[in-house]
Image (cartoon, rainbow, N blue to C red):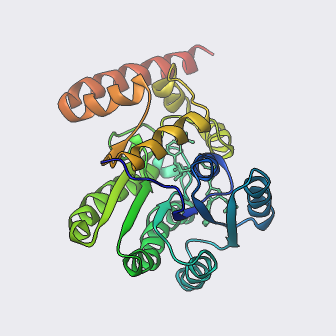
Amino acid sequence: MRRTLTGKNILVTGGSKGIGLAMARELSRRGAKLALLARDPEALEAARAELEAAGGTAVVRACDVTDVEALGRAVSELALALGGLDGVIANSGYCHPGYFHAISPGDAGRQIDTNFKGVVYTLHHAIPELLKRGGGFIAITSSPAGNAGIFGFSVYGATKAALNNLAETLRYEYADKNISVHLLLPPDTQTPGYDQEVLLYPPETRSVLQGGKLFPPEQVAHRFVEAIERNRRQATIGFETHALLWMTRLAPRLWDHYTAWKIRSARRKETAQ
Ligand SMILES: NC(=O)c1ccc[n+]([C@@H]2O[C@H](COP(=O)([O-])OP(=O)(O)OC[C@H]3O[C@@H](n4cnc5c(N)ncnc54)[C@H](OP(=O)(O)O)[C@@H]3O)[C@@H](O)[C@H]2O)c1
């Protein structure tokens, strides 16, 4: 059954930029009221001003999702400002790619804290707000890297694999509380975060991911919001991502061979230079 998002109060973490901001715009066009949370107050204010200029309603709060206590206060304040929460999109996250041993324990820890603990903390604080309203939805922005081993994405992929499992489990735990759970798997999407991460790709990562389509955030956000409306358990977009998900599930050796071929070809090019 299709749910309406008109008039719903929705928290989007990482709603100031990239895919999160594109989802906020898409939800606002459908008449939802937004609570946006991210660290940079200026980007948040710009997002709020843009949504309100287009006739929407948005409240914003600067907070780091890794700070569990500050996050608790921020979620309560945002929920109060909107008059409750009907949905939460736990979307904050980033990728620090590299050879496993080139990623310092500090950089690995920051990814784990932001991508995994940040989502756990967000849901810890937001789910009671949904329960107060008799239910709602949870959407978690994961990544296809949580389903497949992608060269150079060791720690990042592991944080996203953890989110996949979290989503599956929460789906069962909250089924009788009228809370649906949706897993969002963005393909390569042109965002400020993507522009940063590609600068760090080892040659093998470039080679494995070469040829994949780069999507505009608007197209990805449209698919994701539609998936929430249509109560889909998982959403993605694009031939390459569907092929990757299919291959790693049904024919993992095929992905092994493809990856090995792409690594060889990257290393041949490196030695030829
Ligand atoms: N773009 C892609 O190709 C792609 C592919 C697969 C998955 N994803 C996933 O999609 C999500 C959004 O990515 P994106 O590409 O849109 O990234 P982005 O352009 O970098 O935007 C990330 C958003 O998260 C916020 N954020 C980051 N760290 C935070 C923290 N510690 N606390 C609170 N907010 C934080 C950022 O704002 P501040 O910096 O101001 O805090 C920003 O609003 C991420 O989870 C990412 O892993 C992206």
Task: Judge by depth and name the residue closer to the eye, 119 or 34.
Answer: 34
The answer to whether residue 228 is above or below residue 242 is below
Q: Is residue 123 left or right of residue 61?
A: left
* Residue at the limit of the structure toward the top, as seen here: 272
Estimate the x, y position of residue 202 in percent, counting from the top left: 56, 35
The answer to whether residue 114 is above or below residue 131 is above
The answer to whether residue 178 is above or below residue 133 is above
Estimate the x, y position of residue 207 in percent, counting from the top left: 50, 24
Total numbered circles: 0
Estimate the x, y position of residue 246 in percent, counting from the top left: 26, 30
Task: Judge by depth and name the residue closer to the eye, 17 or 57.
Answer: 57
Q: Is residue 264 left or right of residue 92?
A: left
Estimate the x, y position of residue 129 in percent, counting from the top left: 45, 79
The C terminus is located in which quarter? top right
Name the residue rendered at 32%, 43% in the picture.
Answer: 147
Quarter of the rendering containing residue 70: bottom right
Name the residue rendered at 54%, 56% in the picture.
Answer: 93
The answer to whether residue 33 is above or below residue 20 is below
Task: Judge by depth and name the residue closer to the eye, 184 or 29.
Answer: 29
